[in-house]
Image (cartoon, rainbow, N blue to C red):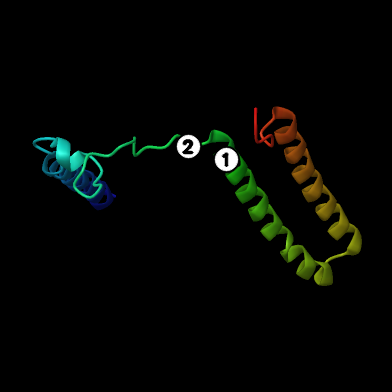
Amino acid sequence: MFIMILAACLIIIISTIMMMISSILSKKTFIDREKSSPFECGFDPKSSPRLPFSLQFFLIAVIFLIFDVEIALLIPLISVLKISKIMLFWTISFFFIIILLVGLYHEWNQGALEWTS
């Protein structure tokens, strides 16, 4: 037991020292205006390099990813149909699809699916 406590303390001390060393070494000593600006053929940029990002686009992309993963979770239900009872299969499928539809209704009700607002 003592060896485990000693090993844990040693791991914590070594990781703390490594984090402190990396923090000290990663500090930049000065910020150069030319190095921090975007390169545009040697000239100053005409417009801001940071374009505003559409929050609606991000929300729709996240919703797409969520439903894409959920559809991927539906695919194994086909193989489960062969080894399970038909009533159990339909019950599980029904509840899974109901959960998807309730989530879709909630997102629709909150206005997350509207592109323009």
Q: Is residue 23 visible?
A: no
Give the answer, above or below, for where 76 lies relative to 5.
below
Give the answer, above or below, for where 68 lies relative to 103.
below
Q: Which type of secondary structure does the marked residue at label 1 adopt?
A: helix
Residue depicted at x 86% and y 53% = 91
Report the amino acid beneath label 2.
Phe
Give the image quarter of residue 79: bottom right
Report the amino acid beneath label 1.
Phe
Give the image quarter of residue 105: top right
Q: Is residue 24 visible?
A: yes
Which residue is labeled 2 in the image? Answer: 53
Residue depicted at x 17% and y 42% = 35
The one nearer the camera, 12 or 52, is 52
Q: Which mark is residue 57?
A: 1
Q: Which type of secondary structure does the marked residue at label 2 adopt?
A: loop
Question: Residue 60, image x and y in percent?
Answer: 62, 42
**Badge 2: how crowded within 10 Å, few (<14), some, or many (20+)?**
few
Question: Residue 102, image x and y in percent?
Answer: 77, 38
Residue depicted at x 21% and y 46% = 15
Q: Which mark is residue 19?
A: none
The one nearer the camera, 59 or 94, is 59
Give the answer, above or below, for where 78 lies relative to 112.
below
Mark 1 vs 2: CB contact within 8 A? yes
**Badge 1: how crowded within 10 Å, few (<14), some, or many (20+)?**
some
